[in-house]
Amino acid sequence: MLIDVTTPQHLDDRFRESLGALPEPERRRDPAQPVRDGVALTGHQLLALFDAQVTSRQLDLAGRWLRSFGEGFYTIGSAGHEANAAVAAALRPTDPALLHYRSGAFYCTRAARAAGEFLAAGGDEATPTSGAPEPAGAPEPAGVPDDAARTVAGDEPSDEPGTRPEPSPVGAPVMGAAAYRVGADGTAEAVPTPADPVANPTDVTADPAAGGGDPAFSAVQPDAYAAAARDVLRGMVASAREPLAGGRHKVFGRADLAVVPTTSTIASHLPRAVGLGLALERLRRVETAGRRDGADAPPRSPWPRDAIVVCSFGDASVNHASATAALNTAGWYDHTGLRIPVLFVCEDNGLGISVRSPQGWVERTLRARPGLRWFAADGADPVETYRVAAEAAAWVRRHRRPAVLHLRTVRLLGHAGADAESAYRSAAEIAADEARDPVLATARLLVDAGLATGGELLARYDERGWQIRRIAEEVLDEPKLATAAEVVAPLAPRRPARVAAAVAEVAARAGGPGAGARVEAFGGKPPELAGPLTLAQSINAALADGLLAHPHMAVFGEDVAAKGGVYGVTKGLREKFGPARVFDTLLDETSVLGLGLGAGLAGLLPVPEIQYLAYLHNAEDQLRGEAATMQFFSQGAFRNPMVVRVPGLAYQEGFGGHFHNDNSVAVLRDVPGLVIAVPARPDDAAPLLRTCLAAAAVDGSVCVLLEPIALYHTRDLYEPGDGEWLGQYAEPGGWAAGHVPIGRARVYGVGSAQDVTILTFGNGVRMSLRAAAVLADEGIGTRVVDLRWLAPLPVADIIREASATGRVLVVDETRRSGGVGEGIIAALVDAGYVGAARRVAGVDSFVPLGPAARQVLVSEEAITQGARTLLAR
């Protein structure tokens, strides 16, 4: 029966009818043999793929069933994309995978691979045979033209056919090092498995109950599939027992399956995948060169040395800026000779919700990408899909270079439960997709190969369906997140005592066993002996100390290496620490942050620079949607520690305009869990940076160090030549005592400090101190509070200092609407502050060029007058 929309009932009925119409096989084939002559996939493996596909399909049906009575909260399914089960089978279970939302069959197969219940053909992966052309503009990696590529990638040959993965080292994150089985009581329990189950095949005994009595079905036990199904169903019903996100979102992710959660539907995880590939290759080079033990030892990768990254996305996403950035960056680095082992998988069903991808556009777009090897497969043929996927994975693994697998799929059941396909698709189009149902294609092949009858497959389908329904009924009764505290618990863990201890430990090493290396790194003159420093010089010295203290730290961004930064803040760091740890990137902020996200995920401590605050807006979702959500949606199983340096704010007289004088930070303060530090004084810059580095290392924090450009080279405070804006750099022995915890302000008393409290930050600190000096001459005592932290705000300090005078002037150099001042006033109101309060803030305008900027920015005169007005009340 043809209808104008595919419903779960219709899809199920059609599948049953099609199985019933399949002819009896002419003869039975030994399931241990290949399903076709000349192919690697065996009957056992094809049956395993069918099982994974059916599990995924039944999960989609269960999702719609749960939604029908208001107990299911996610109906975007995988129907039509079940060919990705063959992709998962072609990969190793220790290859980190970043999956899009139609990856149910991939997830089920990955679970079986990790549990040793699915053995790959041909000893892990097929041998490349296609003779596909090399990507345009991609020379062999042996030629490395620049020092950054040469040092990060290494010079030794990387073609290592037959290299087996190594177990994760002791102490590394548990990713792919364990599996789980469903016990007799229906619960999942962890069991140890080898890093590569192919090298240690499981002895599977026959179980006639697994498939209607046919021994062919006994090759794969259903345990891993049932456990994977329970994961997915728990996500659908928002169960607090869901193993990764804990009911916060329905994601495909699990640390012990090396599946990294992604929450984006528009490919914002692709830049992270490129960064992860770059980090894996760098760590691989470090291990190849030999490693040492101890606190100063470089980190090991949590994945095997020859692991590759797989990243899947839909055809419509190929047009998104994030995907364009990632594919371009992968090709760009490959062109320079820097190796990035990433396999992009574009699953092409021809639709982005209701918008069609123009015929041939996706293939043309992907094939035209320089530096990417292109592979293609039709998901309606599971044998061919497996062969091509294995070939692509083997090529990436051997050459350590990026490739893209263009997998043709279909979309069944619409985009999601509420999608009425009849509004944009004809009945003929829907029927054509149904005819290419990948699960039905696998069933036909099983029958044609003599491995099963249609009736046996239908029994298998029903058995799996009842199993999924039983699990769905069980998870319905599981608890949900019931309090706000439960929801936000993994968002941004704060362990200030451990952070302080980490700073003290770094100080002890710098002043003790690392003292000699430190003196050598600074050319015999450490910064504490260099005299008073500017803000830029202090940040530079703190970055150098950070690189000395954290062997896994890397500083990178546009112009940070050879040039030393536009303002000289990173000058000399590449010469001190080498181009593997301080390097220039291409000019794309999305990719810069993506590199940081991937590096943090791999265990490094990335410190990327976004050249100007305004440029961050081009890539803000990499912080909001990717960085800040990682611990939230994985309950800390995955994290991406990062300290993003952002030169910004206004007051660069005679330079720039709104892109170089950007005073908008609302986009940062709105990101839950993000830490924002603003060093105004040179003697605060190093402690704030050290705290951010320690918080990233200890808690996995995502921090932004917002550096006021106009104060970088400022030397004077009150009079020309007074040098009172310079600061002394503390020696290591003083770092612990001078530690600045997250969310603690600094207070300056001017005069009696009893009349008015000025709450400010950044450029406002210097202006407020100058204004306070004028007020002191009038007999007015002022407390100037440098917030230092814009997120979280130092609320306790704000309330204490406001209450001390009963008169508060908020000096906010950002805009009146959406500015920091709004948050400060709200904090005062929430705390029951009853004194007087007034705001001086920037005008709701972009910052214009030249002297006109003074008309919209806060001035010293406005601060002085604001204080006088408060006192006159």
Image (spheres, helix red, strand yellow):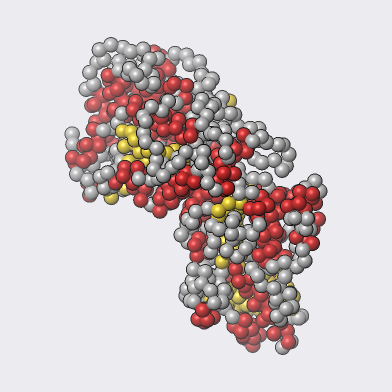
Name above or below for residue 239 compared with residue 561. Answer: above
Instruction: Give the quadrant of the N terminus.
Output: top left
**Where residue 579 appears, x then y in whole percent?**
61, 49
**Residue at image x 58%, y 40%?**
154
**Residue at image x 54%, y 61%?**
611
Instruction: Give the quadrant of the C terminus.
Output: bottom right
Quadrant of residue 716 in the image?
bottom right
Please say whether residue 425 is visible from this viewpoint: yes
Name above or below for residue 154 compared with residue 185. Answer: below
Quadrant of residue 803 in the image?
bottom right
**Where residue 327 appears, x then y in whole percent?**
42, 47
**Where residue 442 appears, x then y in whole percent?**
31, 26
Q: Relative to residue 596, is residue 365 drawn left or right?
A: left
| 179 and 177: which is toward the camera | 177
Name above or below for residue 393 compared with residue 639. Answer: above
Name above or below for residue 95 compared with residue 218. Answer: below
Please say whether residue 670 is visible from this viewpoint: no
**Where residue 524 appears, x then y in whole percent?**
78, 55
| 304 and 163: which is toward the camera | 163
| 610 and 382: which is toward the camera | 610
